[in-house]
Image (spheres, helix red, strand yellow):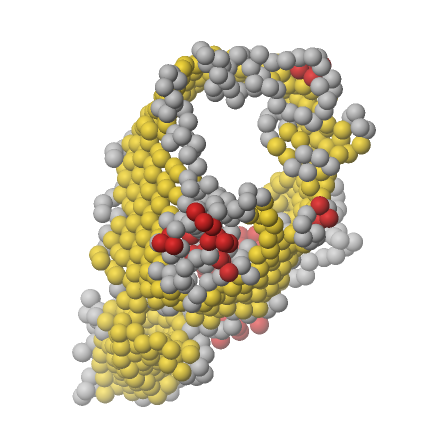
Amino acid sequence: MASIPIQGFAQVELDVPELSIQTQSYLHNPDAGTYLYRNAKVEWEEISVESTEILYHPGKNKLTAKGYVRVTEGEVIAVMDELEINIKDGTGVFRGAIFYDASSKAYMTAKEVHRLDKGEYVAKTCTFTTCNPKSPAWKVTGSEVKYYAQNFSSSSSSTLRVGGVPVFYFPYLAWPTVKRRQSGFLPPEYLLVRSSLKKFDLGYRIGIPYFWNIDQEQDLTFTYDWVELRGPGFRLDYQYAWKEGMRGEIKFQQFFERDPRSPLNESGSLSPQEIESSELKPQRFKFEFNHNQQLDGQSRLITSALVYSDSQFQKEYELIESPDPNTAQQFSVNINRQFSKGSVTFSATQTRIFSELAILNRKIDLTQIQYLPAFSFQFSDTLWRSEKSTLTSSLSGSAVRYFRVKGYNGEGVNVTPRLNFQFPLFQHYNVSLEVGEKISSYKVRDSDVPGSEDAYGFNILDGKAEINTTLSRNFKTDSGIYSRFKHLIKPRLQYEYIEDVLQISDSGVPFGGTISTRRLATLRIENVLLVKRRFFERRIKLTSLSLDRMRRNQLDPVLIRKLEQILGQELGSEKLFIEKLDRLFGGELSAQQIDSILGYAEKGVIPMLNSQAGVQTREGKSRNLANLNFVQHYDFFKKDPYFQPVGPSVKGNETDSNQPLLPLRTILNFRPGSTFSINLFNRYHHQKRRVVEYSLEVSVGLSAHNKASVNFRNNEEAYQTPFGNDVAAANTFGFSNSFEASDELAFGFSGTVNLDADSYTFRRRLSSSAFTLDYRPECWDIRLALTEDVGITESNSGLEQEYIDRTLYAYINLGGISIPEQILPDME
């Protein structure tokens, strides 16, 4: 009988794992061939057993424990009354057990648990919850639970109880613990969608999903839906990966609405009298198909199909606020083959878009262009290279056959060869010259108009030239937050040319006339401020208290004895301390062991800015602190007020026709840290001698979850840039804030204020707003979102009308377990 603490190792057979045993005392019974350990801890492989009494029988490879028993395996911790386990094959029985899986934060209690293999358990007469098992807000009770740590678990004859009240019964239920999936019912979904507009008001929505794990290559999820104000529905989600390099999915949703729709409010631009009574209960469905397959080492096939029954399905059942595009049908097939210097693609697409957001008006935009089929290619090569000079060429183009349901159909070919030459000039300047030509030819016809055959084609030359340089200066400081500054000034002088070409057909119709001529010079001055952060190192050392904490947490005694050699030695930085550990242990410590030792070490304080003398410092990586850019365009066509292009009209209307100097753009970005930024933009109009557009955005964040931003934008009048971008007039103020009050509660709000609201029907300054609340107690989540928007719809008289849409979303999730198949609103 031993009465002093003992640590030892035991191994009887080569195929039996070696045991590490720590005990206060032990008793050997030679007749029974057993060892009785008291207040002991036994470890082998990834399993640790602690108990007030452990009995080990080496001949049977059997370990039993009674009293207070604690078992740890990976992230699973179990406390039980009694344990029997075979250390050779890992099978065992736990009685009166409470399990906790740290990876999924789940608890499981059971009268009896059988351990079948590593991380695999079967529990009899048990409960499952992510709440405190002593007083759970919800729990699942089942006759048998199969639990797979880091995988997917299931139970049979299960009942979901909320607050002790039975809510759902499942003959079979499954839930994720991290990766693998098992067939069975998934946790139910609950969603509440209330809108001030009856046509978008759903009420509560309950979904009960069932997952069928067909095999390793395919699975199917079937979800039964009940929508309070609509009726029943279902969802199917089939996913497959039949072989390597192939994956795909087929999805289908359908809802069976019980009430007819209102033709007065939901026919859009159609007259209510045009709607037949049989059309007031339309079918509601969605079909989606995606397939991606690698054909060989260079080729890939991608196909997809998407069909919606009506224009409101996305907004109502998928919670997409503004569907864009509002798809009716979309089919595509794409085969791509890659080469060393380019690629070729064969494709065919068909797209149909609803003409407006109105469920009873299923009219399609018949002018939508369909491409069937199309061939495209792109190749590039380096023709010559010498030191810093490079000459490259590229060739791209396509051949298409396109059609419209209503309008002109046709076929065409276009090819664009291009050369690019980059070279240094006078050592300090870089020059880039690029020239290309778009060559195109089309034949068109309107099948509804006899004799409408026509043709057009044109060659358009374009070119770009740029000369730039970089000026820089470095600054160094001996104190402060930043140790080094680098100011870069990059002046760029650019010129862009697009040939003015007549773009009309043989009969004089302006087909394809979309490429406007351009002669635009641009001066850009880019200022970049780079900085290196000064980090003050904290002194670090191992103290007697550090070693005592290591012993209490049962770190390796051999490790602790070696660390006693540097006890009390103060190192100037963490880097020096790690180097000391490497020398002491001969580089044998793992990164995990080093991090553990650093956690026990005592660290000094960071000095104040006014007392930095003699303090160990290090420089961080270079990063961008601020950018200040000036952009000045000069449009040569505006020098002549009487200039009329041969082809399409020149783009851009920021100034009058006789004012070639366009407004000066100033762009400032200031980012002193990852959680704070200031962005400023303005346009200065030289002829008006004042700023005509400006915007400011300020963002600040204390952490990833606590952040806020405000923005202001004012633009006196709408305009078009020289590149054809349309910018609307605006006078708005926006704000957003998200705040995490605690680990359980977070809320946020955002909105846009229209400062010119008097010009609108409702004269509402707050044109859109949202308030969100996320409550995450110990074992369940609830998310609420209240949104309000001012929208525009078209009445049956053809006039646009404003309306206010207020919507409340509520989503409840038991256990905080996210299911990929769940439909969630975008609450950001």
Q: Position of residue 783 (x, y in %)?
A: 52, 65
On the rendered structure, is 405 left or right of 19?
right
Quarter in which the C terminus is drawn: bottom right
Work out whether 43 lies above or below 501.
Answer: below
Of 109 and 344, nearer the camera is 344
Which residue is pictured at 67% across the width and 50% down the height?
A: 761
On the rendered structure, is 487 left or right of 9?
right
Q: Position of residue 685 (x, y in %)?
A: 76, 29
Of 7 and 359, nearer the camera is 359
On the rendered structure, is 242 left or right of 382?
left
Work out whether 287 lies above or below 159.
Answer: above
Of 122 and 251, nearer the camera is 251
Q: Quadrant of residue 705?
A: bottom right
Which residue is pictured at 42% across the width and 39% down the height?
A: 364
Which residue is pictured at 72% across the width and 24% down the height?
A: 655
Q: Quadrant of residue 180?
A: bottom left
Q: Is residue 303 visible to the viewer in this orientation of the structure?
A: yes
Q: Position of residue 19 (x, y in %)?
A: 29, 72
Work out whether 272 lies above or below 105.
Answer: above
On the rendered structure, is 353 left or right of 662?
left
Q: Is residue 21 visible to the viewer in this orientation of the structure?
A: no
Of 424 and 463, nearer the camera is 463
